[in-house]
């Protein structure tokens, strides 16, 4: 006999873990199905912004690797500009630690987690959903697809839609203690080191996470770009890399239908990464919270209509991401010009920092940039 739950969540990342936590603490019977054995490695630059930490009512600090209080921007390795924030604006993390921490909070709240349990099929019936995984059937009233950019739930629910994506390649690089100490507390972004994208360096406790990503929508020999970026940084090459892996980053900024009857998508499965930097953890957590609110109301009223979820996500998240998309289109189309005229402007730097920290929106940043563009251009050309 199939085991019955109120909600089944497919995927144990930030979106799936948060959805399970938010539902379980409200007394909803939740099962999380994760295809990998936990804790599992996850390719990710590994940055958690201040606004993400402020969303959750439990402590994420056990997963923190380094506290970020400053940033450096450069163009093709040159013309570096440093900005000191004077306070923590984010933290670096290893995703396997962060994801597992959130899932543990969900379990403490009452959720059940089954790992090593890959979903092989989903059947939508009038009064329930049947999920087939690891040679067993599980049934639920509502299903959450939080299984990433290439997740199966969207396919089974016929919710797959064309979505622009960034492509990133990242390596964890072992360096000397001195080199690691020199990078402490600071993230580095370089524009122009790869076509229509950027390179980054994120300090972790024992390694540096170094990567490149392109917003072109197709891979352009990113491995070569990463090796060139490492060379610019003066960091060791392949033999000292712990890992080198690539992954797609599904970008938001376009309104989409993210629900069906008794099913919805959250996080990367919903294509909600921020289009200028590719940051996705905040949007994974926030969309999961909206998902939990929507599902709880549907369960209380014994309904199956989740349309308010798409409406809320498009109103609260996508409407702002479309302005980040406009900024990204400009930045990655004309990286040299934008870097020297805009990115080096303290006003723009602080505007982006405030948007990432949640003190302002990308809509506000975009409009402020339009207003101040003549002044910024004049000062940048001096």
Image (spheres, helix red, strand yellow):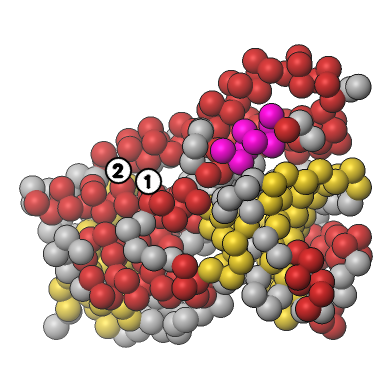
User: Can residue 153 be seen here?
Assistant: no
Residue with the most extreme left position:
301
Q: Residue at x 38, y 82 (%)?
A: 115
Foreground residue, 260 or 351? Answer: 351
Q: CA distance from mark 1 to mark 2?
A: 7 Å
Residue 258's disc is 1
The residue that label 2 is drawn on is: 309
Q: Nearer the viewer, mark 1 or mark 2?
A: 2
Does residue 364 appear to the left or right of 371 in the view shown? left
Q: Residue at x 49, y 41 (%)?
A: 358
Quadrant in which residue 37 is drawn: bottom left
User: Can residue 58 be seen here?
Assistant: yes
Label 2: element kind: helix
Residue neighbourhood size for the residue with mark 1, other residues' Cα within 10 Å, grouped as few (<14), some (14–19), many (≥20): many
Label 1: element kind: loop
Quadrant in which residue 113 is drawn: bottom left
Q: Is residue 221 above or below residue 160?
A: below
Residue 38 is situated, as x and y percent measured from the top left of the image, at: 44, 82
Q: Are marks 1 and 2 in contact (CB under 8 Å)?
A: yes
Residue 186 is situated, as x and y percent measured from the top left of the image, at: 70, 57
Does residue 371 appear to the left or right of 272 in the view shown? right
Q: Is residue 41 above or below residue 275?
A: below
Query: Where the N terminus falls, by quadrant?
Result: bottom left
Q: Is residue 350 magenta?
A: yes
Foreground residue, 158 or 183? Answer: 183
The stretch of residues the image draws in magenta is 347-354
Residue 9 is situated, as x and y percent measured from the top left of the image, at: 31, 66
Overall secondary structure of the magenta section: helix
Quadrant in which residue 196 is drawn: top right
Q: Is residue 119 above or below residue 72?
A: below
Q: Residue at x 59, y 35 (%)?
A: 324
């Amino acid at each position: 006999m199939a085991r019955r739950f109120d909600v089944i969540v497919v995927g144990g990342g930030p979106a799936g873990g948060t959805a399970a936590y938010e539902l379980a603490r409200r007394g909803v019977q939740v099962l999380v199905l994760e295809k990998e054995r936990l804790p599992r490695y996850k390719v990710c630059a590994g940055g958690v912004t201040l606004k993400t930490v402020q969303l959750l009512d439990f402590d994420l600090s056990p997963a923190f690797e380094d506290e970020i209080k400053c940033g450096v921007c450069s163009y093709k390795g040159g013309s570096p500009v440093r900005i000191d924030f004077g306070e923590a604006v984010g933290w670096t993390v290893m995703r396997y630690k962060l994801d597992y921490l959130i899932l543990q909070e969900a379990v403490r709240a009452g959720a059940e987690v089954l790992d090593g349990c890959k979903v092989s099929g989903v059947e939508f019936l009038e009064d329930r959903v049947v999920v087939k995984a690891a040679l067993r059937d599980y049934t639920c009233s509502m299903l959450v697809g939080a299984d990433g950019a290439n997740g199966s739930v969207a396919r089974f629910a016929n919710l797959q839609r064309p979505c622009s994506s960034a492509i990133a390649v990242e390596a964890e690089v072992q360096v000397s203690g001195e080199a690691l100490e020199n990078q402490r507390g600071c993230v580095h972004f370089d524009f122009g080191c790869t076509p229509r994208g950027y390179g980054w360096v994120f300090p972790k406790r024992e390694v540096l996470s170094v990567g490149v990503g392109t917003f072109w929508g197709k891979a352009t020999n990113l491995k070569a770009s990463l090796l060139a970026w490492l060379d610019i940084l003066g960091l060791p090459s392949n033999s000292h890399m712990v890992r080198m892996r690539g992954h797609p980053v599904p970008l938001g900024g376009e309104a989409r239908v993210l629900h069906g009857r008794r099913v919805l998508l959250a996080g990367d499965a919903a294509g909600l990464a921020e289009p200028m930097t590719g940051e996705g953890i905040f949007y994974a957590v926030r969309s999961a919270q909206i998902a939990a609110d929507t599902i709880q109301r549907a369960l209380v009223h014994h309904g199956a209509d989740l349309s308010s979820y798409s409406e809320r996500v498009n109103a609260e998240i996508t409407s702002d991401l479309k302005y980040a998309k406009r900024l990204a289109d400009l930045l990655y189309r004309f990286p040299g010009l934008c870097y020297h005229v805009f990115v080096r402007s303290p006003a723009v730097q602080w505007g982006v920092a405030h948007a990432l920290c949640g003190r302002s929106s990308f809509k506000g940043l975009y409009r402020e940039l339009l207003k101040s563009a003549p002044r910024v251009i004049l000062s940048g050309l001096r």
